[in-house]
Amino acid sequence: MFPSTSPDTGREPWSAGPASGPAGPARGYPPAPRTGPADDSGGRERKGPRRLRKGGPSRRPDDEADEAPEEEVPPVPVRRPLALTVAGFAALLGVGLVLGAQTAGPGHRLPFAFIIFGVQLLFVLAWTMAMRPPALLVVALVSAAAAGIADAAAVQSDIAGLAPLGYAAAAGFVLAVLGQLFRRVDRVRVTDSLGSTLLIVVGVVAFATLIVLSRIPKGTQAITVCLTATGVALLVARLTDAVAPWPRLAPQVPRGAAGVVAGAMLGTLTSAVLGSYLVGFTPTSAALVGLVTAGTAVLADLAVGYAEAGRLMAGEPPTMWVARHMQGPLGGFALAAPAAYAMCVLFL
């Protein structure tokens, strides 16, 4: 039997199109996979995600290859007359300190103390003008006062030791920081300048260790060996930079590695030669103390050059010409003085 009504009942006879409703897939077959939108970029394959640039539009890694390479910064030229002048100053400073040590005796240490105080004043002038801490005049006056107190304590103390010098350095640092806190303009920069203030105060007091060293056995001979090695090391390093400043350690620093190495080696050789003639020394022991003091002095001189280059790259105005170039040799001798004391006490 057939149904009385056809399934097409209710459809208009003139409708020739398919039935309304969504067209589904054919029965028994899975739906066809969906495809993404057509790529209208002209067939260009995207090689990587876009990356955001600060202050500019985003870019892909393949766009970096199209950019022009950055220009290299030309190295700072080495001025030969300046290197020769600094070398001469280092030699004169070493000769003055060594000859001054020969005048020190059990009851005649004041002449050597006056020589040390003159070098300390040069150190304060050079380092305060080069580093320019807040309240510059206050820091300079406090540092000079700390140097005088340390020298007096080194001469008049009953026991030759570094404790009075440490007290003088600590008091000078605290007073210098307090002097910087008085003015509102200087108060803002106190935190950033703590390191420079500490270097100035401790460096100027470090020269007084030479007076303490002259009061212990073998101290004068140790001063002769160590300061001669220091002076020769700084002299050779600067002379080598004037002739052959290579290989350059940094484009912004007009120094070469050959001068640093040659200065330390020849300073050590000079101390070994002196050790064979001085009482209480052998060539081996003199070479050991000379190596330490010459190496520290040369590295301190090099560090001063890096610090000056950093200040210039930061946009700070250049400081006084004389102070800027006296800073390196003075810093080298200031670091060599406590190194000589330590080597004499520990190894001699």
Image (spheres, grey):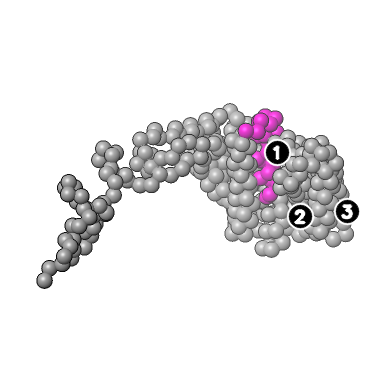
Q: Position of residue 46 (x, y in %)?
A: 31, 44
Q: Is residue 321 above or below residue 200?
A: above
Q: Which numbered disc flags the more N-terminal residue, 3 or 2?
A: 3
Q: In the image, which residues are magenta?
A: 315-336
The answer to whether the residues at label 1 and label 2 have Cβ atoms under 8 Å apart is no
Q: CA distance from mark 1 to mark 2?
A: 29 Å
Query: Looking at numbered disc 3 in the image, what kind of residue is underneath it?
Result: Gln
Q: Position of residue 144 (x, y in %)?
A: 82, 42
Any magenta on residue 77?
no
Residue 156 has which mark?
3
Q: Residue furthest front?
A: 4
Residue 147 has which mark?
none
Q: CA distance from mark 3 to mark 1?
A: 33 Å
Position of residue 174 in the picture relative to residue 16 (left or right): right
Is residue 155 visible in the rendered image? The answer is no
Query: Looking at numbered disc 2 in the image, what kind of residue is underneath it?
Result: Leu
Q: Which numbered disc flags the more N-terminal residue, 3 or 1?
A: 1
- Residue at x-position 19% and y-position 47%: 15
